[in-house]
Amino acid sequence: MTLRSVERSELAREAVAAARAGGEVARRGFAAAKSAAHHKGAVDLVTETDLAVEALIRERLTATTGLPVVGEERGRSGAEGGATWIVDPIDGTTNFAHRHPHFAVSIGLVDAADEPVLGVVYAPFADELFWTDGDGAWLGDAALAPIRPVRLSESLLATGFPYDRQTNPDNNTDLATAFLMRTHGVRRMGAAALDLAWVAAGRIDGFWEPRLKPWDVAAGVALVRAVGGEVVDYRGERHRIDAPSLVAAHGALLAEMLDVVREVRYRWEVDLPTTRATDE
Ligand code: IPD
Ligand code: CA
Ligand code: CA
């Protein structure tokens, strides 16, 4: 099914309403978050609020749009195939659980080919809503400008580190070091959906991270592409929703970033040939 522009704009409106409602639940759960956190893995947390926000968004989008929903915490509801909502109820749970207010509700819609076609990223404490219907992109009511080129040496980048970083040697510290030495700075803010939204908004110039999940990126990828940015994997191929690596930036900066990725990954392969995670 190909979604027409009018359908996408109607669906984007529903996603905006659902993200705002979910954000309100997250805001209310914030004070109790620290005591309510449970471990999914050594450093991977989940709170009651993650579950409550996901349940609310799932119920709402199912009722208003009838489309299937895939959520981080409870998986799929609805049929396989066709346009599907991809929901991260709280992106930045580690921040949330430590009462650090940089986190967001992320709702993306992928089409039958798993291409992100629209998305909403809502940060409840900043009360900032980044959204795209696939035709334009906005921060609240203000249209986002097309992404601008910047040289790597003058760029501000963001990244994140995967939850298996204590056990998997392919943990992104090598690339972080390399970019730190070649840019104005590297930020680790703790919410990949917001990192992508901030690339779209021009607050940072580029973002990379390995092993993100579809719910981390579905909305943000749609946002970056809506302002003319490119999103690829470490090989430089167009990013797919389940790709094992992601780089997002203006095309010119992206080319420079991929040079660094290739250089570091090449050294990495030479040094650690047997323990390498399956990326390519
Ligand atoms: C995480 C955040 C973080 C990124 C991790 C993600 P979660 O999502 O986006 O910035 O580095 O890879 O898993 O667990 O807070 O929804
Ligand atoms: Ca996430
Ligand atoms: Ca999450």
Image (cartoon, rainbow, N blue to C red):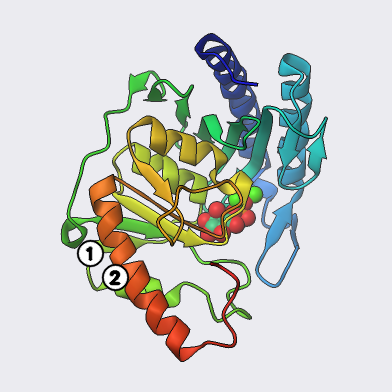
Kind of residue at badge 1:
Thr
Q: What amino acid type is highlighted by mark number 2?
A: Leu
Q: Quadrant of the N terminus?
A: top right
Where residue 117 sits: x, y (%)?
A: 53, 29
Where residue 10 appears, as percent x and y from the top left, is: 58, 12
In the picture, the disc for residue 180 is 2
Q: Quadrant of residue 56?
A: top right
Callout 1 touching callout 2 (CB < 8 Å): yes
Relative placement, left or right, of 77 versus 104 is right
Ligand 1 location (quadrant):
bottom right
Q: Secondary structure at mark 1?
A: loop
- Total marks placed: 2
Kindly state the secondary structure of the residue where label 2 is placed: helix
Which one is in front, 162 or 264? 264
Is 55 placed above or below 192 here? above
Does residue 93 appear in the picture of this structure?
no
Q: Residue beneath label 1, please?
A: 183
Asked if residue 43 shows in the view, the reply is yes
